Image (tube, rainbow, N blue to C red):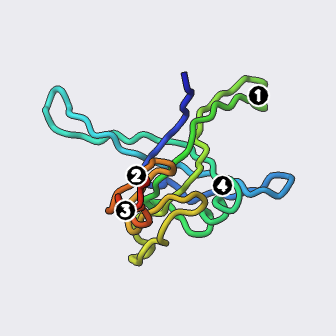
């Protein structure tokens, strides 16, 4: 049986990106993403939205681009994987966290009322505007720019 560790999220940044560098000089950008879940309140019957918060780590040039172009409140789409971290805090207690390691970050919406950069940084996700196609999704449709036409498929 194959193992799959894949996460696709679309939400808004809850704070400005935080960029730092490893001792070897590799860029590491930390993002905090809020994604709303819609649910119906059992008592009132009203629809409500509950925010879920996710820590996202973006490595390398893609992380530098996130730090340069993103800001609090900006909508983004993340395609990545979950990773479990364990460490020992300064007080000696063991700490654990699950975070998302981004393979692709797609900038959505506008920046100061303008258009977002087309496409994502670092990973072949296509589409323009607010369209997000997860990397490796295999979407082969005329609605997706760059997808081959049905006549081009050899079977």
**Residue at 54% in and 65% down:** 70
Q: Which mark is residue 88?
A: 1
Q: Secondary structure at mark 3?
A: loop
Vertical comparison of 140 with 110: above or below: above
Vertical comparison of 123 with 34: above or below: below
Q: Residue furthest left?
A: 45
The residues bearing labels 2 and 1 have C-alpha atoms spaced at a distance of 43 Å
Mark 4 burial class by Cα count in 10 Å: few <14, some 14-19, many 20+: many
The residue under label 4 is: 29
97 lies left or right of 126: right
Mark 1 burial class by Cα count in 10 Å: few <14, some 14-19, many 20+: few
Say whether disc 3 or disc 1 marks the residue closer to the N-terminus: 1
Q: Quadrant of residue 140?
A: bottom left
**Residue at 43% in and 54% down:** 154
Q: Quadrant of residue 100?
A: top right
Vertical comparison of 48 with 64: above or below: above
The residues bearing labels 1 and 4 have C-alpha atoms spaced at a distance of 22 Å
Say whether disc 2 or disc 3 marks the residue closer to the N-terminus: 2
Q: Are marks 1 and 4 in contact (CB under 8 Å)?
A: no
Q: Between tags 2 and 4, which lies in front?
A: 2
Q: Position of residue 56 (x, y in %)?
A: 58, 46
**Residue at 46% in and 62% down:** 126
Q: Which mark is residue 139?
A: 2
Q: Which mark is residue 149?
A: 3
63 lies left or right of 11: right
Q: Between tags 3 and 1, which lies in front?
A: 3
Q: Between tags 2 and 1, which lies in front?
A: 2
């Amino acid at each position: 049986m194959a193992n799959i560790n894949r996460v696709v999220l679309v939400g808004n940044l809850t704070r400005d990106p935080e960029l730092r560098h490893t001792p070897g000089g590799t860029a590491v950008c930390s993002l905090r993403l809020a994604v709303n879940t819609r649910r119906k309140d059992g008592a009132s019957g009203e629809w409500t939205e509950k925010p879920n918060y996710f820590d996202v780590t973006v490595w390398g040039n893609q992380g530098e681009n996130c730090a340069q172009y993103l800001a609090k409140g900006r909508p983004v789409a993340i395609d990545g994987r979950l990773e479990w971290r364990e460490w020992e805090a300064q007080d000696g207690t063991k700490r654990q966290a699950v975070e998302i390691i981004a393979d692709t970050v797609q900038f959505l919406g506008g920046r100061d009322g303008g258009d977002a950069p087309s496409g994502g940084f670092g990973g072949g996700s296509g589409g323009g505007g607010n369209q997000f196609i997860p990397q490796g999704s295999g979407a082969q449709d005329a609605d997706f720019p760059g997808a081959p036409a049905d006549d081009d498929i050899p079977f």
